[in-house]
Image (cartoon, rainbow, N blue to C red):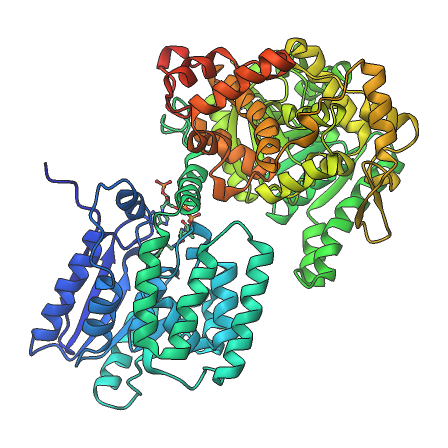
């Protein structure tokens, strides 16, 4: 059966002798195999035609190209497509056919030229860009390497240090910076782009402008000794920052070969490494994350109804504490007008002060100008009553977790806010149905659960009840995107997706510590696994007050499977309450540097005797692998429950929620993706074995038992009838 073609290129030859080849593959003009085939044919035709003197390559609808079609990697990984001969695209086509051609080519860049898109542009003999276009090589972020010659051409155009920075951070530069770096030859207004590129191409053909093959340039490369030092430093940094990833180091190897042995050898090395990295597990995971992150805004029954997000102009926030002020910061940073309501002048001043401090920290770091700071702050108004709520489009309540207080607030909101106003709560634990019990506005009540600090953390859990209207969800998804959060739509339950999935994580750590595993060893193993910090360090950061309050919710709601540990309450009694008190599981110095504390043993021993738990010699000698399994398999188990209950629409949403909300390493693909890579059968058998020895905390849920006993993937979709939402 013939497969559907993905994208194409067109070619038009003008009376001036310029062939304009346009990439057409919406939405971002990615370079699919079909586009690349077409491009090659057009190019060959242009080279063969006597009426063509020069070539311009551009992208349709204001976008040059978002790079190689990422789904193509998936096809190769699954064996659905045979990988082209190593070096075919980058050497045979881009270098030997395009760059070495007898006719010059110019890239006319609008919007973006990323990854393979920029690499194609760099293989042209000049690049003309519209202002603001994004130029970058973000491949490492996807687990692959720049594979269309980027490892060779970027250092030759912008210098080694800048090229490594762009490649290793995956961050693009704007056209203007690109111009000053030498990546772009001219920046012209969008309306003049094509004509300017045509003229430039003809000027090259007529030898009025230089005919530059980037791959042969050497003027920007440092002397060999210096280049080796720069690469050595880059390698050391990479090893430190991404110890579990191989592909950045493999990428550096390709760069180095090019500098030491010349661009041809570099291109060959790049091609070889490029084909190896595609099959790394970390690459499979990162590509899964790329598509899953974009998939969170596709909610069946909600986003497929043709609903258009309503315009949200003004948002009110109730409560100027840590969460409220963080949310206000996120909103004004994206140009929303915000009213911050507090109960008295003192609290209001403190709330506004927090927002100010959040922005000032950007000014201090040079990430915001004073002028922008003032303009942004002017979007925020304080209020002590509801009068100014009469024209707001959305309210986000962010007060303390007290049901009757929230119920009163929502009843008041119903009175003061307009009919269309979305009534959102930032609660992290309380049932939204209960919060709205005293209103008749259940259809516009929704959870907007931000993670602290709200202006920094990338996740927004949008919590819907059975009554929340699809329009309200579509509106909030749009706000989420505008404030640059990744929104994940979840159902209403204790802890929603992230906190619910991850409560067993800390509990497992306490369970092990109480039975003899060294807590610092647990933290080390978990950090090595790729979490930003271990569970004990995390408890210190969150603070024991919050840790106890959250644990209580889970103990009350899921008593049969919670592990009650006395370690934290005993430490709290001694006024060791985490980082804020400079003492928790660790001791903290002025610079917040954590140091293990031998005193900790005392609390663990006491907790052991209070709880009547005994030391377990086996648990006292766990390997790092066993620690990871005993802390994360209970998380997988809870994630399975969340999935089976229909709290999440798809397993991939749980992957993204865990990555964005808890810092689960993206190169492991997220909790469910990782679980499937370990194997459901193995996880099930381990949990089953531990539950027999250690009790119900580890007992596999019915969903895991059903899939695990057959070895079926945990992330496979639920049968429709099983989904609650
Ligand atoms: C050999 C080469 O060296 C290898 C490569 O080139 S690898 C690819 C390198 N390119 C990249 O990493 C760019 C990836 N894309 C992006 O960063 C962003 O999509 C973007 C900046 C281009 C646009 O962002 P934004 O406007 O927010 O739109 P976004 O929602 O991300 O993407 C729009 C759609 O295009 C798709 N898309 C974006 N880039 C794509 C790509 N390179 N391949 C396939 N699909 C792509 C997205 O999946 C999404 O699809 P959907 O609508 O079905 O969900």
Q: What residue appears at the point 76 percent right and 39 percent down from the top-left corner?
A: 541
In the displayed structure, 438 sits above or below 3; it is above
In this view of the protein, can residue 307 be seen by the observer? Answer: yes
Quadrant location of the N terminus in the rendered image:
top left
Residue 293 in the image, given as x and y percentages of width and height = 45, 39
Name the residue rendered at 45%, 83% in the picture.
220
Q: Is residue 383 left or right of residue 719?
A: right
Q: Quadrant of residue 328?
A: top right
**Count of picture labels:** 0
How far from the left and from the top, in percent, is residue 34? 19, 52
What is the x, y in percent for residue 325?
A: 74, 40
Side (left or right) of 343 relative to 316: right
**Which is more toward the observer, 669 or 694?**
694
Q: Residue furthest right?
A: 574
| Along the viewing direction, whichever of 720 and 541 lies nearer the viewer | 541
Q: Is residue 275 left or right of residue 80?
A: right
Q: Residue at x 88, y 36 (%)?
A: 599
Tell me residue 540's x, y (percent): 78, 37
């Amino acid at each position: 059966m013939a497969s559907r073609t993905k994208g194409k290129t067109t070619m038009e030859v003008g009376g001036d002798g310029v062939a304009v080849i346009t990439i057409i593959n919406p939405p971002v003009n990615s370079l699919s195999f079909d586009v690349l085939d077409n491009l090659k044919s057009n190019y060959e035709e242009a080279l063969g035609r006597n009426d063509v003197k020069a070539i311009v390559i551009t992208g349709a609808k204001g976008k040059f190209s978002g790079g190689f079609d990422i789904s193509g990697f998936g096809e190769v990984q699954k064996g659905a497509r045979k990988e082209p001969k190593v070096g075919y695209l980058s050497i045979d086509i881009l270098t030997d056919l395009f760059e070495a051609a007898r006719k010059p080519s110019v890239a006319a860049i609008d919007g973006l030229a990323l990854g393979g898109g920029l690499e194609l542009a760099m293989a042209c003999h000049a690049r003309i860009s519209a202002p603001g276009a994004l130029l970058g090589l973000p491949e490492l972020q996807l687990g692959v390497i720049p594979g269309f010659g980027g490892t060779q051409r970027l250092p030759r155009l912008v210098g080694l240090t800048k090229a490594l920075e762009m490649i290793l951070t995956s961050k693009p530069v704007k056209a203007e910076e690109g111009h000053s770096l030498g990546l772009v030859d001219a920046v012209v207004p969008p309306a003049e782009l094509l004509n300017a590129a045509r003229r430039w191409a003809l000027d090259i053909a007529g030898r009025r402008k230089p005919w530059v093959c980037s791959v042969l340039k050497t003027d920007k490369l440092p002397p060999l000794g210096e280049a080796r030092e720069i690469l050595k430093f880059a390698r050391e940094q990479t090893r430190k920052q991404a110890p579990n990833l191989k592909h950045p180091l493999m990428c550096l190897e390709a760069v180095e070969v090019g500098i030491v042995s010349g661009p041809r050898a570099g291109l060959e090395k790049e091609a070889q490494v490029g084909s190896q990295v595609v099959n790394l597990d970390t690459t499979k995971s990162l590509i899964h994350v790329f598509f899953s992150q974009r998939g969170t805004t596709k909610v069946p029954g909600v986003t497929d109804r043709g609903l258009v997000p309503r315009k949200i102009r003004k948002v009110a926030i109730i409560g100027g504490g840590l969460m409220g002020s963080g949310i206000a910061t996120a909103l004004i940073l994206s140009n929303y007008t915000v009213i911050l309501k507090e109960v008295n002048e003192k609290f209001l001043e403190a709330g506004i002060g927090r927002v100010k401090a959040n922005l000032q920290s950007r000014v201090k770091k040079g990430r915001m100008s004073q002028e922008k700071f003032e303009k942004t702050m002017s979007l925020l108004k304080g209020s002590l009553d509801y009068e100014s709520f009469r024209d707001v489009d959305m309210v986000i309540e962010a007060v303390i977790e007290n049901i009757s207080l929230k119920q009163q607030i929502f009843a008041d909101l119903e009175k003061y806010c307009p009919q269309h106003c979305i009534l959102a709560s930032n609660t992290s634990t309380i049932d939204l149905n209960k919060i709205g019990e005293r209103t008749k506005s259940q259809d516009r009540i929704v959870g907007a659960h931000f993670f602290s600090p709200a202006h920094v953390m990338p996740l927004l859990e949008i919590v819907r009840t059975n009554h929340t209207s699809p329009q309200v969800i579509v509106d909030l998804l749009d706000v989420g995107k505008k404030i640059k959060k990744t929104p994940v739509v979840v159902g209403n339950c204790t802890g929603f997706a992230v906190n619910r999935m991850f409560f067993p994580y800390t509990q497992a750590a306490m369970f092990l510590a109480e039975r003899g595993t060294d807590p610092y060893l647990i933290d080390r193993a978990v950090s090595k696994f790729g979490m930003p910090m271990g569970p004990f360090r995390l408890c210190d950061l969150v603070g024991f007050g919050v840790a106890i309050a959250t644990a209580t919710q889970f103990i009350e709601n899921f008593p049969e499977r919670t592990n009650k540990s006395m370690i934290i309450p005993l430490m709290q009694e001694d006024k060791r309450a985490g980082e804020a008190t400079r003492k928790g599981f660790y001791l903290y110095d002025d610079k917040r540097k954590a140091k293990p504390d031998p005193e900790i043993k005392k609390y663990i021993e006491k907790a052991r005797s209070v709880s009547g738990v005994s030391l377990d010699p086996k648990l006292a000698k766990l390997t790092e692998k066993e620690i990871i399994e005993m802390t994360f398999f209970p998380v997988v188990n809870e994630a399975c429950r969340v999935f089976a209950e229909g709290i999440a629409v798809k397993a991939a949403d749980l992957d993204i929620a865990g990555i964005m909300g808890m810092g689960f390493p993206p190169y492991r693909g997220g909790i469910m993706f990782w679980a499937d890579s370990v194997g459901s059968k193995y996880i099930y058998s381990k949990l089953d074995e531990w539950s027999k020895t250690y009790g119900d905390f580890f007992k596999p849920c019915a969903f895991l038992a059903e899939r695990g006993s057959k070895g079926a993937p945990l992330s496979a979709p639920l049968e429709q009838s099983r989904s609650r939402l």
